[in-house]
Image (cartoon, rainbow, N blue to C red):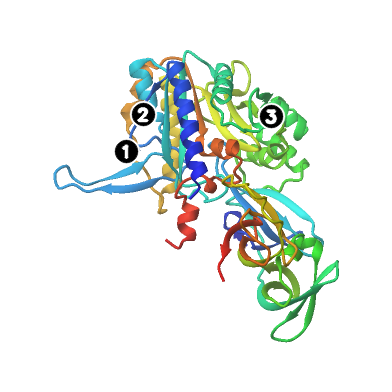
Amino acid sequence: MNITAIEQRSTLMRNMRHWFSESDYLEVDTPLLSTHLIPEPTIANFATWYLSEFHGSRELYLVPSPEVFMKQIIAETGRSVYQFSHCFRNREQIGSHHNPEFTMLEYYTVGADEVDSIAITEELLAKTRLPDTPEHLLPPFRRMRMAEAISTFAGFDLDATQSINALRSEAIRLGLTLPDHPESWEETFNRIFLNCVEPELPQDKPLVLTEYPKQIDCLATQTPGRPYRRRWELYAGGVELANCYDEQRNRETVAAYYRDQYAQLSSERAYTAEVIPDIDQSFIDLFDHFPPCSGVALGFDRLLMLQGGYKTIGDLILFSFSAMMADGR
Amino acid sequence: MIKAGQIDKGTALLIKGQPFICVEREFVNPGKGSAFVRLKLKSPATGQVLRETMKTQDNAEDITVEDRDCQYLYNDGEHFHFMMTETYEQIEVPMSTFEDYQFIMKEGETYRVTFWEHQPLDIQVPTKVVYEVAEAEEAIKGDTVTGATKTVVTDTGLSVRVPIFIKQGERILVNTETKEYIERVNR
């Protein structure tokens, strides 16, 4: 057992709790076991059974993120909140940056947008860092718009490549193999991004990649008049570390998004062994009085891995799946 | 054909008519997107490295390979020379494809070698191997800082960071993938 990693985890969490408390965030502690989830087709879920002679038995789910509970608290209190939450994602590879159970630091800042969240995250990481964290993992962050990254590393104008045919031509020009069947703009974009852009992103400082294409549907608001979303991802040492949205607050937009996501999830998972979670329709009501805010989800184990100089999260997650499985358990 | 998501370390694929072995694989989900797999593939013939990121649902052409026991004899600086233990036939494997294997394989030891149409594609070295420490500096007296390490060289020529209490002639267990020390092996 890595005693140093236990101590480093404790130190970093204590530093962060102190910073959040000084900055007037409310720490919350929301359930890991839930009767309902929000529909997320790309995340496979864990399900288990609650057995009860009194209330009737029912299926329960381990949460893949604390998002929906935290948003309800924000709607009720109007306050900025944060949480260190265990998250559960099924089918996750057990690898250098993944474990089916991991710790997420999620923080929502009321009255802030995604640009404010860059500065907030810079201050958080600067003030709470472990001693000996290498300079290239510390703020200030580099900032780069997605269109700039595409132009630099894939050599085309993203603004002018909004049709699927134009994007396919660029992918073919870049020498990528595309499937014979048609695929969505988002899928082809991801091929280009992962093959040509992400491996080339500069690593001399953490990088905030801003303005994701609007075709990648999510609960980040759109940039007015341009085909992008107010979302960023933070890369440090080549590792995807955090994801931030200017949070969508329009009830109808959120409702339509979840309808689409659920339709996709239920059609993809029908006739498979995948869990189709129950969806609570009523949580949409929170958007009747949801304040403007920006939310960041940061992979805490990955941050600890980088700051502590570890190669894999298996080196620092206590009782990781890789260790448990290697022992033949 | 297999799905890209089924490709694992050691899977042999045919790409533009050339055999490649997968040497690294990692799944990635680009921010809430569908699953992709990032592959590092190596051509055993030329040592050429391909990096490819595919959707897990994409098709890839896999090839049927065969594993045979081969005894490692020596290297001549360019090739590893093996003898197939069943047929006594000798084979050569270009060293450029297996960069650091000269420091982790032991002469006289038998390894599983993967063949495709009589062409050696891959050498399988166990993940954990015991080596003898051939060169080690004496620990400096008074240096009792916990976690202090030094570098030693094994009988195969591999440099490994070890705790300072390891002495020359002792045996250590090493992870051959990461080249990291695991533990001291008691006689």
Residue A180 in view here? no
Residue pointed to by mark 1: A34
- Residue linked to disc 3: A205
Q: How far apart in space, not on screen, are marks 2 and 1 (Cα)?
A: 10 Å
Q: Could you tell me if the residues under marks 3 and 2 are in contact, i.e. CB atoms within 8 Å?
A: no
The answer to which of marks 3 and 2 sits earlier in the sequence is 2
| Circle number at residue A69 | 2
The answer to which of marks 1 and 3 sits earlier in the sequence is 1
Given residues A189 and A148, the one toward you in this image is A148
Q: Chain of mark 1?
A: A
Residue A326 spot, x, y in % from top left = 49, 60
Q: Quadrant of the C terminus of chain A?
A: bottom left
Q: Nearer the viewer, mark 3 or mark 2?
A: 3
Badge 1: few (under 14), some or many (20 or more) residues near its Cα, within 10 Å?
some
Looking at the rendered structure, the number of numbered marks drawn on it comes to 3
**Furthest residue in direction right, as rendered:** B77
